[in-house]
């Protein structure tokens, strides 16, 4: 029993132990599950917190992104709007008051909006608040009267300031303050309607018909109670009509204190505490600008009033251009504007049968050149080179016409210009040559070989023509005769003259020739021009600057037209036009002949023997022509001296006294010069007779081998090799000596270029050694002689032989008989002397007073009277020496001598 119990107890214990063990295991499992669950809970909590944080960060970033985009978009939109606002209300219509200035619209530009204030726009710069008026709306304003009046004055100033003077007519009805509210606009000629005038005004506006598209009437109605109460039914109906149809007729009402019917053209503005809302902008509110200062309004109105009195602004040169280039025919004359009148219409000036010629006058600086530029521009853009040919001569020092000729920077030229004379002041001969050329052209045309329309009309402009006519000499006499002929018969044959002067003496000169001045029926007077108009016609003394009086009835008062002249001075603008015309020039259109008084022509290469050495077998012309210089004529031909086998075919170049040449008196008095220079006998005794010339020719006698320099045993300047141009190398000659050298060089080179010839260069003037040496170097065959071996007995030759002598007067008495014999007999043997003597008296001494062997001469700085021994008429020719000009006389061809320009042969002394 006891053991059973014990066993039972043990079993129970066992069970209990197992149960306990199981319970403990369950507990442990539960504990573990709990720990796990707690862990999971913590994890979930953490994840939740992280998630929350992340969401918050994402939200923030999204919000920031949205904000950024919003600001970007808003700024972009605001930029667009601002740009749009600038375009819609440009210049005076939109500028803030502190920057405000009137602005004129481009022609054809429709009116835009006007600014009244600003529209706040987030944090960014506010946008301008704009409202419509011209061509779009009437304005109906509600709010405090004082603020509205300020608003109105701003709107009016912007509207007037952004249109052209006179385009907007302002009418103000202000019964309460009798116009004082907008009194600052009075200087504009604003119409202020009296209190009782409302009905009449409304009636007038209801019937108003707009005269032109760009004219507007702005009518400000500042109505009081009495106006509203006193309005009749008919007036109400008229006001309704104006509201409906006014805008299309250019009538715009700006109203406060009066009801306007609803209509799409009515822009309603309601203002409260300087903030306005208006119907076109919906709920957007506009912070009103402060009003413009009264002084700003008054100053603007005064200025506009002044401009209105003066008329529209003067035409610009571009406004005078034709629609189509070269579309006009000159068959019946030339018509072109030179400016406009105060009403804005262009003033055209005719040149044809009548008036045929023009006379322009004005004191210096009054705008004559500018007028010519304008006239030439309007003529040459209308008439092509087949219709118009221009000959332009400027007798001033300036270069007015240089712009029409090709230059180093701009190769274009004005295709109608045939000839341009620049700085012709000292070269009246050129003026005369041009008149002769025109006279010849006139004769051809008059001979019936001219079908009008076949040859272009010629317009010859002579600026400061009095210079040509002033001399009381043969040039003036012939010029007068030619001008008279051209003036009398020219217009009939399409030749027209435009004479210009800045000197009333110029007109006086013409007045001495009634037959001449009578033909100049077209007169153009610049401000303060005297004598060009009739005596009782004072118009020129009252016109302002940049104006002209155009009178096609010889200046009679009553025939005046006042012209405002454009500024035609801008060379760049003209350059563009000229290049356009130049590109359109017809094939074969030649460059104009340009004579520039200050330029020295180069010896053309055709007259240089370079490269071509004529063979001694080549035929010799009967009288080869020595080219001496450029003739002062229209075709720039060379002046030639024919050297045939006839007595007297020698040339004396006279003048160009040099430092080394003693004065005549010294020489004539004691003969020292001769004896010192050549009279030491060496040249004659030791050299001349010993055939050195030939030796020199075949040996090293050519300059450049040291021969000329070393040939001075007395150690004169020039001991070094000639031609190096250093001080002391003998180049102490005057400019005129250089010119004498150039004449001889041009003559020799041109002769060498024409056929076989032999040259002997005799250089007795140290300062000429360099020039003589250069000549020898360029000649195909030449001997060199100087004081040491000079002689005048050349060997016989089958080809022409030319002795080119530099400073021949230095040869001395010993050589005179031989020289005289050579001058006398040489030409028939084809031996010619082309020599430079430094004065007429030296030449005369050398020829013992018998000057017949000198058939031709070129005088440099020698006065006309000194030349009388060489001239057929007593007293010598009329000649006043001037630089780079020489007088050429060949008694076999000339009746009177001609002025030539010695060519520059080598460019190292000019
Ligand atoms: N219509 C104009 N508009 C503006 N400027 C002008 C006008 N006419 C002339 N001028 C200017 O006035 C100045 C003098 O004009 P211009 O040289 O034409 O006078 P001018 O009478 O030919 O003088 P001068 O006799 O001394 O040669 C120049 O600077 C020129 O640009």
Image (cartoon, rainbow, N blue to C red):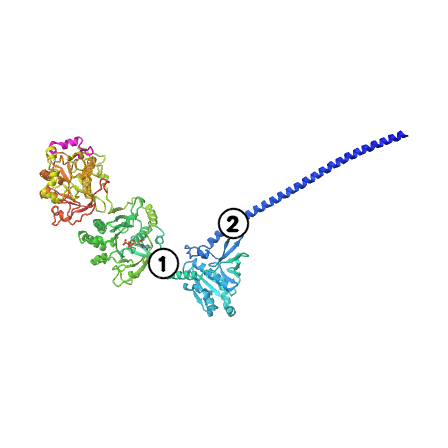
The answer, for residue 111, to whether it is visible in the render is: no
Q: Which image quarter: residue 520?
A: bottom left
Residue linked to disc 1: 344
- Up the image or down, 869 lies above or below 779; here it is below
Camera-near label (1 vs 2) is 2
In three-dimensional space, the C-alpha distance between marks 1 and 2, rounded to whole angstroms, equals: 47 Å
Q: Nearer the viewer, residue 441 or 6?
A: 6
Residue hosting label 2: 75
Location of ligand 1 given as a quarter of the image = bottom left
Secondary structure of the residue carrying numbered label 2? helix
Q: Are marks 1 and 2 in contact (CB under 8 Å)?
A: no
Quarter of the image where the C terminus is located: top left
Judge left or right: residue 219 versus residue 460: right
As for residue 22 lying within the magenta part, the answer is no
Front one among 811 and 633: 811
Residue extending farthest top: 3
Q: Which residues are magenta?
A: 687-708
Q: Is residue 480 left or right of residue 201?
A: left
Name which of mark 1 and mark 2 comes first in the sequence.
2
State the residue in front, 415 or 112.
Answer: 112
Classify 285 as above or below 849.
below
Q: Secondary structure at mark 1?
A: loop
Residue 248 in the image: state x and y as whole percent: 47, 60
Q: Residues within 10 Å of mark 2 (few under 14, many from 20)?
A: some
Q: Tell me the quadrant of the picture where the N terminus can be found.
A: top right
Q: Residue at x 62, y 45 (%)?
A: 56
Magenta stretch encompasses residue 705? yes
Question: Horizontal and vertical percent for residue 413?
Answer: 30, 46
Using the rendered view, name the quadrant where residue 849 is placed: top left
């Amino acid at each position: 029993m006891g053991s059973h119990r014990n066993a039972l107890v043990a079993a129970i214990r066992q069970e209990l132990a197992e149960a306990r063990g199981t319970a403990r295991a369950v507990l442990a499992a539960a504990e573990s599950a709990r720990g796990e669950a707690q862990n999971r809970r913590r994890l979930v909590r953490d994840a939740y917190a992280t998630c929350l944080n992340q969401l918050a960060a994402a939200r923030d970033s999204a919000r920031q992104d949205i904000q950024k985009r919003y600001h970007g978009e808003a700024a972009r939109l605001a930029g667009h709007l601002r740009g749009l606002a600038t375009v819609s209300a440009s210049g005076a219509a939109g500028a803030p008051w502190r920057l405000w200035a009137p602005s004129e619209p481009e022609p054809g530009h429709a009116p835009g909006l006007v600014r009244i204030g600003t529209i706040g726009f987030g944090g960014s710069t506010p946008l301008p608040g704009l409202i419509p008026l011209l061509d779009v709306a009437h304005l109906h304003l509600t709010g405090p009267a004082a603020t509205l009046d300020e608003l109105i004055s701003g709107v009016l100033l912007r509207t007037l300031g952004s249109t052209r003077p006179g385009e907007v007519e302002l009418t103000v009805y202000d019964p309460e303050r009798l116009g004082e509210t907008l009194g600052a606009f009075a200087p504009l000629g604003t119409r202020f309607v009296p209190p009782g005038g409302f009905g009449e005004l409304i009636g007038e506006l209801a019937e108003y018909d707009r005269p032109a598209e760009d004219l507007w009437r702005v009518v400000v109605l500042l109505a009081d109670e009495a106006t509203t109460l006193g309005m009749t039914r008919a007036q109400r109906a008229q006001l309704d009509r104006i509201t409906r149809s006014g805008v299309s007729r250019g009538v715009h009402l700006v109203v406060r204190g009066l009801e306007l019917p609803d209509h799409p053209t009515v822009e309603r503005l309601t203002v409260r505490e300087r903030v306005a809302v208006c119907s076109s902008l919906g709920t957007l509110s506009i912070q009103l600008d402060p009003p413009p200062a009264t002084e700003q309004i008054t100053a603007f109105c005064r200025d506009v009033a002044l401009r209105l009195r003066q008329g529209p602004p003067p035409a610009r040169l571009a406004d005078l251009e034709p629609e189509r280039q070269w579309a006009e025919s000159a068959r019946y004359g030339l018509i072109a504007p030179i400016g406009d009148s105060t009403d804005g219409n262009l003033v055209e000036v005719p040149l044809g049968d009548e008036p045929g010629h023009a006379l322009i006058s004005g004191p210096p600086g009054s705008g004559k050149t500018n007028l010519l530029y304008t006239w030439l521009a309007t003529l040459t853009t209308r008439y092509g080179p087949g219709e118009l040919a221009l000959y332009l001569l400027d007798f001033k020092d300036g270069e007015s016409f240089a712009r029409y000729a090709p230059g180093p920077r701009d190769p274009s030229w004005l295709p109608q210009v045939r000839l341009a004379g620049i700085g012709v002041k000292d070269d009246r001969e050129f003026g005369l040559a041009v008149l002769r050329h025109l006279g010849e052209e006139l004769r051809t045309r008059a001979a019936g070989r001219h079908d009008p329309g076949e040859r272009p009309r010629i317009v010859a402009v002579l600026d400061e023509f009095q210079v040509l006519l002033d001399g009381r000499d043969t040039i003036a006499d012939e010029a007068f005769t030619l001008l008279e002929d051209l003036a009398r018969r020219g217009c009939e044959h399409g030749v027209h003259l435009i004479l210009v002067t800045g000197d009333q003496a110029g007109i006086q000169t013409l007045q001495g020739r009634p037959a001449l001045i009578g033909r100049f029926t077209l007169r153009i007077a610049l401000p303060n021009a005297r004598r060009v108009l009739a005596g009782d016609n004072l118009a020129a003394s009252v016109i302002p600057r940049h104006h002209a009086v155009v009178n096609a009835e010889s200046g009679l008062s009553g025939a005046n037209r006042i012209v405002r002249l454009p500024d035609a001075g801008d060379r760049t603008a003209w350059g563009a036009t000229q290049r356009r015309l130049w590109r359109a020039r017809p094939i074969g259109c030649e460059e104009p002949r340009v004579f520039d008084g200050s330029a020295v022509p180069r010896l053309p290469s055709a007259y240089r023997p370079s490269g071509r050495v004529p063979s001694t077998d080549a035929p010799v012309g009967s009288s080869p022509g020595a080219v001496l210089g450029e003739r002062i004529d229209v075709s720039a031909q060379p002046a030639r001296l024919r050297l045939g086998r006839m007595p007297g075919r020698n040339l004396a170049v006279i003048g160009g006294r040099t430092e080394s040449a003693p004065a005549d008196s010294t020489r004539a008095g004691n003969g020292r010069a001769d004896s010192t220079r050549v009279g030491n006998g060496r040249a004659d005794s030791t050299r001349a007779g010993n055939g050195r010339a030939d030796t020199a020719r075949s040996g090293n006698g050519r300059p450049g081998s040291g021969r000329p320099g070393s040939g001075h045993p007395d150690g004169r300047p020039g001991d070094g090799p000639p031609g190096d141009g250093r001080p002391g190398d003998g180049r102490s000659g005057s400019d005129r000596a250089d010119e004498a050298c150039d004449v001889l060089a041009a003559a020799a080179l041109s002769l060498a270029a024409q056929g076989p010839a032999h040259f002997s260069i005799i250089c007795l003037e140290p300062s000429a050694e360099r020039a003589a040496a250069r000549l020898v170097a360029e000649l195909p065959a030449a001997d060199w002689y100087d004081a040491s071996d000079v002689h005048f007995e050349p060997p016989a030759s089958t080809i022409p032989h030319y002795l080119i002598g530099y400073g021949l007067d230095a040869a001395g008495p010993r050589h005179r008989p031989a020289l005289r014999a050579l001058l006398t007999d040489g030409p028939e043997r084809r031996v010619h002397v082309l020599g430079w003597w430094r004065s007429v008296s030296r030449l005369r001494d050398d020829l013992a007073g018998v000057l017949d062997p000198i058939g031709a001469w070129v005088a440099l700085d020698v006065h006309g009277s000194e030349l009388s021994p060489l001239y057929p008429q007593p007293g010598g020719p009329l000649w006043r020496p001037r630089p780079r000009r020489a007088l050429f006389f060949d008694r076999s061809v000339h009746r009177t001598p001609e002025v030539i320009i010695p060519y520059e042969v080598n460019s190292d002394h000019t």
